[in-house]
Structures are given as structure tokens and as C-alpha cells.
Image (cartoon, helix red, strand yellow):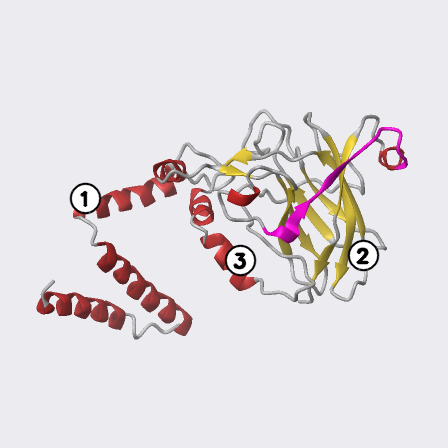
Amino acid sequence: MNTAIQNAETALTDTVVAAFARTPDPRLRQLMQSLVRHLHAFVADVEPSEAEWMAAIRYLTETGQMCDGAVRQEFILLSDTLGVSMLVDAINHRKPDQATESTVFGPFYIAGMPERAAGENMALTPGEPALVHGHVRDTEGRPLAGALLDVWQTAANGMYSGQDPAQPHGNLRGRYRSGEDGSFAIRTILPVSYPIPGDGPVGRMMAATGRHIYRPAHLHFMIDAPGHQQLVTHLFNAGDPYLASDAVFGVKPALVLEYSRQSADSPLARQHGFDTDFHEGRYDFVLSRA
């Protein structure tokens, strides 16, 4: 490229950046000027044709059209599959080493799910019975009583309630409280690996780039305790074939949970009302101070 053309293109970027110089809010000014610089640098690097640029605009338009405001959020899915969600999470949740690590929120959370008693079964559809239990503590090892654990997962068919109209309201979702000793217990079914929605723009992008659309089996948690930072995280099934290639890059080694098989005549089965063999997972969550 000759120097005059290159200078003109650089001057255009500088002019657009300068157009935001009088933005009253300093943070907004920083965001807009940085966005312009990085977006212009991307365009200068790849030199898209006009047809390619229009295809990109159509792609973003279709991504927005797939969002329904309730359950389906295609832009979150796009952010997840590009690794942006995990980078934002990492930047915003730099924690002490002993605190439980966070991971992506995901696009299928529903607020206001049923309050459940300790050990109550949140599975209203069939699956392999499971118990996930442990404690919620602070970074000094002290129990956190009354911590709220908002929990959700897919059914055995790999779909979340709300996403799947055949599932009862509140299926595999619930809000549990830790006891005075910080303990919690959740009866459920063993999580399964599942595909993220592949019928929209994100699915087309994944197919075009030769990537699979599967997430390893996991249980979602959003945990709140007074005076402590909210924790949004997953517990992933050990041994899942997608642990090393999660479509949304959410796996962290410390969040992998080993389940063990327990018999129907064990004391734990009697304590929690199991009449068949079940999978047991033990995990302690550690929250950092706010």
C-alpha cells in the first residue's frame, strides 16, 4: 500500500477517536475511543471486502433476532464461544488462592426458582440419582450459615427447563440454604454433557470453523452470603469426554467433581431418602470477603 493511502486511513481512525474526546463520562470516553482503535485495527488487518462486511452485519443482526429476552440469549452464547465471557469473568473475579474459582454464568439461568429444603430432590424428570453435598466456608475455614445456593442443570435429555417446554416448571432448579455448620445437600440427577444451541448464528459459526458444540456435564451454582463476594461457578463431572474441549472454555481443574457410587442400603441413602443406588459428590465452596 502506498504511504499516502496508509496515512489517510490512519488519519480517519484518529478523526473518529477525536470525535469522542468531549464525551462527559470519562469511562465511556475511554471505552468508545478504545473500541474505535481496536475495531479499525481489526479492519485494517483483515481488509474485508464490502460483501464480507455486509455479511458480518447480517450475522450480528441475526444473532440479535435469535434472542427472546427470556431463555434464549444468542449474544451471550456468542460471547461464550469466543472466550470473551471467560476473559471478562477472569478480570472481574481475581480472588485469593483459597477461594473457589468462578466460571461463565451461561445463558439459561431463570430467577425466582423454588426455595428447597436441605436434601430436597429438585429432579422432576428421570435420570441417574445423585447427591451433591458439602459445606460453604469463608477463606479462613469458618462455616457460612444461611448462604443461598441457587442451583440449576439440564435434564437427562441435555436441555434446561424453560428451554424445553416438556419439562415441569422448576425442574432441576432450586434455591437451597446452608445450615448452621455451613452444610448443604442437593438431591438431583447426574448431570450430562449436552450441545449448546446449534440452530442459530453461533451454531453456524461453530460448524464453519470445525468446532463441536458440546459442553461437559456440569451443575451450575450461584452462591450468595452476606459480606462475601457472590460466586458463580460450575461443578464438572470428572471423566467427561468434553472437559478438555468445552465449547465455551469454562472448565477449570479445581471445579472438576469426582462422583462415587453409593448403595441403596448405605447410611447416606437412608439419611437422604434414596431407595436405589446413587452417585455421591462432595464439594466445599469457599467464598472471599466482599
Q: x, y (%) of residue 286?
A: 72, 58
Residue 51: mark in rendering: 1
**Residue drawn 54% across the image and 63% down it:** 92
Q: x, y (%) of residue 278?
A: 78, 31
Q: CA distance from mark 1 to mark 3?
A: 34 Å
Question: Which residue lies under the disc numbered 3?
Answer: 89
Residue 70: mark in rendering: none
Closer to the eye: label 2 or 3: 3
Q: CA distance from mark 2 to mark 1?
A: 58 Å
Closer to the eye: label 2 or 1: 1
Q: Is residue 256 left or right of residue 248?
A: right
Question: Which residue lies under the disc numbered 2?
Answer: 145
- Categorize mark 3 by other alpha carbons within 10 Å: few (<14), some (14-19), many (20+): some
Instruction: Answer with the quarter of the image where residue 288 lies.
Output: bottom right
Q: x, y (%) of residue 76?
A: 46, 47
- Categorize mark 1 by other alpha carbons within 10 Å: few (<14), some (14-19), many (20+): few
Instruction: Answer with the quarter of the image where residue 102 lies.
Output: bottom right
Circle 1: element type: helix
Circle 3: element type: helix
Residue range corresponding to the magenta coloring: 252-267
Ranked by sequence position, the earlier of labels 2 and 3 is 3
Circle 2: element type: loop
Residue 184 on the magenta span:
no
Residue 258 on the magenta span:
yes
